Amino acid sequence: MDFTAVQRDFLEGLLVGNRLSCSNIINDLVKDKVGINDIYENVIRVALYEVGELWERGEISVASEHMASAIVESILNELYSTIISKSRMNNTVVASSVENEAHQIGIKMVADVFEMQGWNVHFLGANTPLNDLIDFIEIVKPKVVALSISIYFHIHSLEQMIEKIKYQFPGIVVIVGGQGLRHTYKDIITKHPNLLYFPDLFKLEEFINKIEYNG
């Protein structure tokens, strides 16, 4: 499917604050049996990355960026009943943005992919303090911890989280992703060789299927 026109219309709706138009675009895709990963990757993520770049270049205001994010979050909430799996398996993931990171849409989409696979998902959202995250991991004992960073400026917070999780819970798989790592992910993978980076939700789904198959 060619998503060019849909991407354009969805981005335009976000920039003018037309929540109804954006919601209708996504609902029409769902009705047409377009996969959730395709919707997330080829429509929502593309639009949000463009919004972020417009903000970085000073072409839109912080208020406009927040408005776009709020619309997308409302749409993700609408989709939840569509994506959640009724079957549950004995696997748990904790999904969180890094400390000081105000954006949570990327990690919410990651959490939704795990939900679709029947995992028990603990979605902690944005700006989770490191010590609180560690305490939470101790309580729920997940198989996987997923961390997201939207702005490279927060890379130090991400590395602190990785190091502390790996030190205190050496058996837990830590995965990372997000717009903030698009151009620098090789550096962090080199520094943390046991870390897993996924550039998109399709690669994440492949990993989930593999880890489920291998136990």
Image: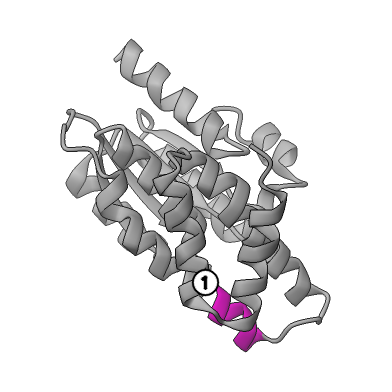
Residue in the foreground of this view, choosing between 134 and 19: 19
* As drawn, 201 above or below 66: above
> Disc 1 marks which amino acid?
Ser
Q: Position of residue 62 (x, y in %)?
A: 65, 85
Q: Position of residue 24 (x, y in %)?
A: 46, 64
User: Magenta span has 125?
Assistant: no
Q: Position of residue 214 (x, y in %)?
A: 34, 11
Residue in the foreground of this view, choosing between 29 and 108: 29
Neighbourhood count class around disc 1 (C-alpha, 10 Å): few under 14, some 14–19, many 20 upward: some
Residue in the foreground of this view, choosing between 62 and 31: 31
Residue 12 is left or right of residue 123, and the answer is right
What are the residue bounds of the magenta stretch? 62-68
Q: Position of residue 167 (x, y in %)?
A: 42, 39
Residue 82 is left or right of residue 98, and the answer is left
- Quarter of the image with the C terminus is top left
* As drawn, 46 above or below 169: below
Which residue occupies 70% across, 41% down?
185
Which residue occupies 52% across, 49% down?
40
Q: Main secondary structure of the magenta part?
A: helix
Q: Quadrant of residue 130?
A: bottom left
